[in-house]
Amino acid sequence: MVKTLRRLVAVTLLLFCSAMTHAETLTIAVAANVRYAYDELAAGFNKETGIAVQSVSGSTGKIASQVKNGAPYDVFISADSETPEALFKAGLAETKPRVYAYGVLVLWTKKDFDSGLGLRLLNDGKIQKIAIANPKLAPYGRAAMQALASAKLDAAVESKLVYGESISQTTQFVDSGAADIGFIAKSVVIAPVMAGKGKWVEVPKGSYEPIAQAVVVLKHSAGPQSANARRFADYLFTPEARAILAKYGYVLP
């Protein structure tokens, strides 16, 4: 009887400690273009504060849909500012969105094309498939469509377009050879894990609207987690975090 009671107490304590650890861990929803920079940001934040973080990654549109359906995220690092602003106006965010960086759109290929031609390269008959992120879900996809329209190429290449759910899937299309070239984020192509993979060129910034990327603390974080969530959001504006973002090719506000 005593042994059974001891075991019951031990199990109860273990479950309690596990629950407490889980409760103290922040869950950060990260737009796909930020996934590589996020690893360094999370490590820096944890080192500075001792607060544990975990992440989920996806397209900005998909994450927003999950938040609307009650996903337990504490902070949303978005690929635009409009989506977190809409969440704030809908009462799903504790704080107003703050722009932490501006994204840069690039053309990336692993094939032997002259990337120096920029968007004109897309007229090459050898290019059969052009990958872009779904413009309905991903801000970088919208930027890609704007760039094509600006260059008056949107109608000419429409039949070549293949759509990824996010920048991550768009990158996979090009990496696997399913697409010949793709519009992706500079923060992805210059990540260490991508070193030596293909070649890229920046899309002229004047051909698409600025990709203002914002962070917001979500309503789910109300209560004990709120202070820690705000600390994480604030961390993105520290000199250390800004240096990491600049390292990954973002333009700082």
Image (cartoon, grey):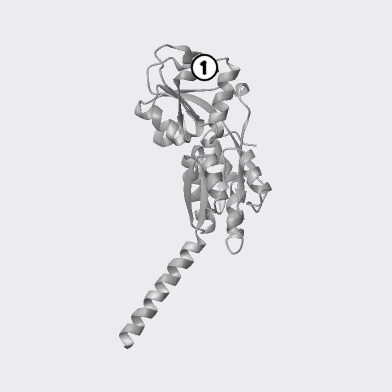
Q: Quadrant of the C terminus?
A: top right
**Residue 234 location in percent, x, y?**
62, 50
Q: Amino acid at mark 1?
A: Leu
Nearest to the observer: residue 86 or residue 94:
86
What residue appears at the point 48 percent right and 67 percent down from the top-left corner?
20
The correct choice, above or below, for 245 with respect to 94 in the image is above
- Look at the image and tell me whether residue 211 can be seen: yes
Report the label total: 1
Relative to 17, is 224 on the left or the right?
A: right
- Look at the image and tell me whether residue 196 can be seen: no
The quarter of the picture where residue 49 lies is: bottom right
**Residue 209 location in percent, x, y?**
63, 27
What residue appears at the point 54 percent right and 25 percent down from the top-left corner?
144
Query: Badge 1 local density, few (<14 within 10 Å), some, or many (20+)?
Result: some
The correct choice, above or below, for 211 with respect to 126 in the image is below
The correct choice, above or below, for 126 with respect to 43 in the image is above
Q: State the residue lying farthest toward the bottom.
A: 1
Relative to 238, is 7 on the left or the right?
A: left
What residue appears at the point 52 percent right and 58 percent down from the top-left corner?
51
Q: Secondary structure at mark 1?
A: helix
**Residue 96 location in percent, x, y?**
68, 48
Relative to 202, is 208 on the left or the right?
A: right
Q: Quadrant of the N terminus?
A: bottom left
Q: Identify the residue position indicated by label 1 in the image.
A: 119
Nearest to the observer: residue 161 or residue 197:
161
**Residue 64 location in percent, x, y?**
56, 45
What residue appears at the point 58 percent right and 41 percent down from the top-left corner?
242
